[in-house]
Amino acid sequence: MSSLPLDPELESRIKKGTEKISENMHIVANEPSLAFYRLQEHVRKSLPPMVEKRVEVVQLNHDLQGCLYDVEYGVSAVKSIEKAEESFSNIKELMKNALIFKQQLRQEEMKRGKKELTSSSVYRRLSAHISLADYSSK
């Protein structure tokens, strides 16, 4: 081994280079654990808001299903009303006929009422006249 005098500048450069290589080797050796630490940190920060959003989405989905059921029920009710149009038309016709028949009955009753009044008064006069004539002839 020869002991050659080294240049102090060269010695400092070698020392800095070996330190950099050692630091890089340390970083490369610890890279997986640093990555896992960063992943754990990210999960710990982002997981609670994600869970809250998931709960909110589930609740909104439940509410949306309820609204969808209501809308489908309303649509089926409207369609059933459309199907009932013929029945309503029949009811309308029957009501018109009933009103016409009622008016005809009123007119008949009024005619009968007038005839009864006139016939009853004529009948009274006639019966009174006959009864008086019967008593006078006896």
Image (cartoon, rainbow, N blue to C red):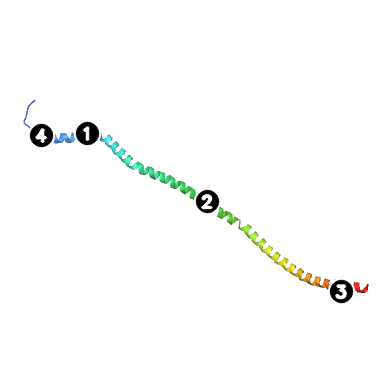
Q: What residue type is disc 2 on?
A: Glu
Write down the residue under mark 3.
129
**Given contact means CB atoms under 8 Å apart, are the residues at marks 1 and 4 in contact?**
no
- 83 to 29, vertically: above or below: below
Distance between mark 1 and mark 3 Cα atoms? 147 Å
- The numbered mark, 4 or 3, whose residue comes first in the sequence reads 4
Q: Nearer the viewer, mark 1 or mark 2?
A: 2
Please tell me how crowded label 3 is: few (under 14), some (14-19), or many (20+) other residues with Cα within 10 Å.
few
Distance between mark 3 and mark 2 Cα atoms? 82 Å
- The numbered mark, 1 or 3, whose residue comes first in the sequence reads 1
Is label 2 in a helix, a strand or a loop?
A: helix
- The numbered mark, 1 or 4, whose residue comes first in the sequence reads 4
- The numbered mark, 1 or 2, whose residue comes first in the sequence reads 1
The numbered disc on residue 81 is none
Please tell me how crowded label 4 is: few (under 14), some (14-19), or many (20+) other residues with Cα within 10 Å.
few
Q: Nearer the viewer, mark 4 or mark 3?
A: 3
Please tell me how crowded label 2 is: few (under 14), some (14-19), or many (20+) other residues with Cα within 10 Å.
few
Based on the displayed image, in which of its 4 quarters is residue 94 positioned?
A: bottom right
Distance between mark 4 and mark 3 Cα atoms? 166 Å
Image check: 114 left or right of 9? right
**Given contact means CB atoms under 8 Å apart, are the residues at marks 4 and 3 in contact?**
no
Q: What residue type is disc 3 on?
A: His
Q: What residue type is disc 1 on?
A: His
Write down the residue under mark 1.
26
Write down the residue under mark 4.
11
- The numbered mark, 3 or 2, whose residue comes first in the sequence reads 2
Residue at the spot x=53%, y=53% of the render?
74
Q: Nearer the viewer, mark 1 or mark 3?
A: 3
Frontmost residue, 56 versus 42: 56
